[in-house]
Image: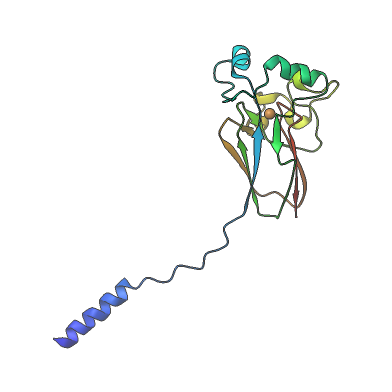
Amino acid sequence: MRTLFASFFVAALTLSFVPAAPEQENPASVTQVVALDECDPVTFNAALGADFCRNVTLGAFTTLSDLFAKAAAGHPDPDWDFEPDTVNIRKGTTLVVVDQGGEPHTFTEVAQFGGGFLPVVNAPGEVTVPECASGFSNVAVAKTRILQGSQRQITGLSKGKHLFQCCIHPWMRTEVEVK
Ligand SMILES: [Cu+2]
């Protein structure tokens, strides 16, 4: 009897033995870029539709006509911005781009910085870059869109320099250097 108990005990021990968890790999590193803007909900939504701009302005905002006027003068509003302007990452790092502004943006890789798809906010004489051509009717552009409060993850960037800009507000630019 004692032997039987002993073998049960051993069996129970064996069954309850949980192999040690495999060694944790280093979690993939993540670097964040934020998209910022100060759209004025009243004037933006009157022109562009309800909920286009969902900014909680807390007193800091730019009206739609001011945004257009600044862009036309060649001095686009600096509150429309990707931060940081330059990012240095190692290969394998995930880039997470978060829209903390009030309106949609795109984070679109381009060969050369240039104009977006809305001539009204391009700098004078600035030509739309091919990667932004046709705006959201182009699936390739639409896929790079980031809505308010959401994020886009970019993985698999090759070593070297990568340029990203917003196809709506083309002065929003970030240069990513992958080592
Ligand atoms: Cu934008």
Quadrant of the image occupied by residue 173:
top right
- Give the number of marks: 0
Picture quadrant of ligand 1: top right
Give the image's coloring scheme: rainbow
Give how far across and how far down residue 26 sits, in percent: 58, 61
Residue 49 drawn above or below residue 165? above
Q: Residue furthest right?
A: 125
Residue lying at 67% horizontally and 31% vertically, measured from the top left? 141
Q: Nearer the viewer, residue 72 or 135?
A: 72
Give how far across and how far down residue 60 sits, in percent: 64, 24
Residue lying at 34% horizontally and 73% vertically, measured from the top left? 17
Image quadrant in which the N terminus is located: bottom left
Q: Residue furthest left?
A: 1
Residue lying at 71% horizontally and 33% vertically, measured from the top left? 81
Q: Nearer the viewer, residue 131 or 64?
A: 64
Residue lying at 72% horizontally and 19% vertically, measured from the top left? 67
Give how far across and how far down residue 33 sits, in percent: 66, 41
Quadrant of the image occupied by residue 29:
bottom right
Give how far across and how far down residue 57 sits, in percent: 60, 24
Residue 175 drawn above or below residue 148? below
Residue 7 falls left or right of residue 113: left
Q: Residue furthest top?
A: 46
Quadrant of the image occupied by residue 72:
top right
Image quadrant in which the C terminus is located: bottom right
